Image (spheres, grey):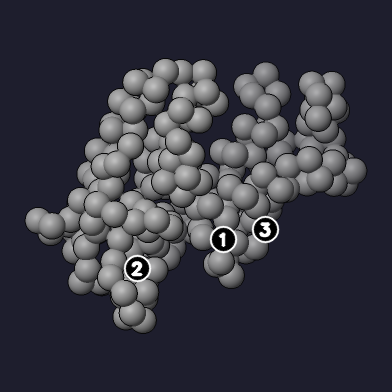
Amino acid sequence: MDECEELEVARGLRTGDPDAWRRLYDAHARRVWGLVARAVGADSTEVGDVVQEVFLAAARSAAGFDPARGSLAAWLTGVSRRQIALHFRRRKRHLPVVDSGMSDRGSDSASLMDGGDGPAAEVAAGERADRLRTALTELPADYEVLLITKYLDGATIEQIAVSENSSTEAIRSKLARARRALRAVLRRDFPELCGDDVRVHDDV
């Protein structure tokens, strides 16, 4: 969608034009679904519910969209992050306490958090992953995106540096700051996961 199309869609959104909403959804639904799935968990049955909340929230706030302040994609990303954060804040009130920690190693959405083997460990790992995703939503947007890109999407430092038009040294430094911020949130919000043996993955 080029700039002229965006302006046309933006005008339609402000007036409630159904065609504008169809064009917005067709252009950006896949990106929103991907963003929500990475945050909530691709296998979660709640992904569709959160995506629906994103577009409902977008509909409620469309009249205030200002193209001069950014693109439709950036606006929808902000709406998505707010709805993801609200989702996890609602869930956070119901998360059970888990007596297990994080280690240095891991390879899935728990690659920042890791557990043992067996059914009980799988349940605990899933609950730790929920806490991790909740904590990520409390970080500044650039830290959240960087950690998700590195640890959940599996991008290398070099790939991130190219996409950010930055140096590998700068990305490593920012990643270290992002991990420190994540540790602070985890210690504040989930102290049961923060014993002496608990560490956030430091492999960069």
Mark 1 highlights which residue? 42
- Return the disc, 2 or 3, that comes first in the chain's sequence: 3
The quarter in which the N terminus is drawn is: top right
**Quadrant of the rendered structure where residue 120 is?**
bottom left
Tags 1 and 3 touching, CB below 8 Å: no
For mark 3, does the 10 Å Cα neighbourhood hold few (<14), some (14 to 19), or many (20 or more) residues?
A: some
Q: What residue is drawn where x is 30% and y is 61%?
A: 114
For mark 1, does the 10 Å Cα neighbourhood hold few (<14), some (14 to 19), or many (20 or more) residues?
A: some
- Residue 196 percent coordinates (x, y): 9, 56
Q: Is residue 99 above or below residue 160?
A: below
- Residue 135 percent coordinates (x, y): 35, 51
Q: Is residue 91 above or below residue 36?
A: below
Q: Secondary structure at mark 3?
A: helix
Instruction: Say which of 66 and 3 sits in front.
Output: 3
Q: What residue is drawn where x is 31% and y is 74%?
A: 117
Mark 3 highlights which residue? 52
Residue at the left extreme of this rendering: 196
**Residue 185 can be seen, yes or no:** no
**Mark 2 against mark 3, which lies toward the viewer?**
2
20 on left or right of 201: right
Q: What residue is drawn where x is 29% and y is 66%?
A: 115
68 on left or right of 115: right
Mark sitting on residue 125: 2
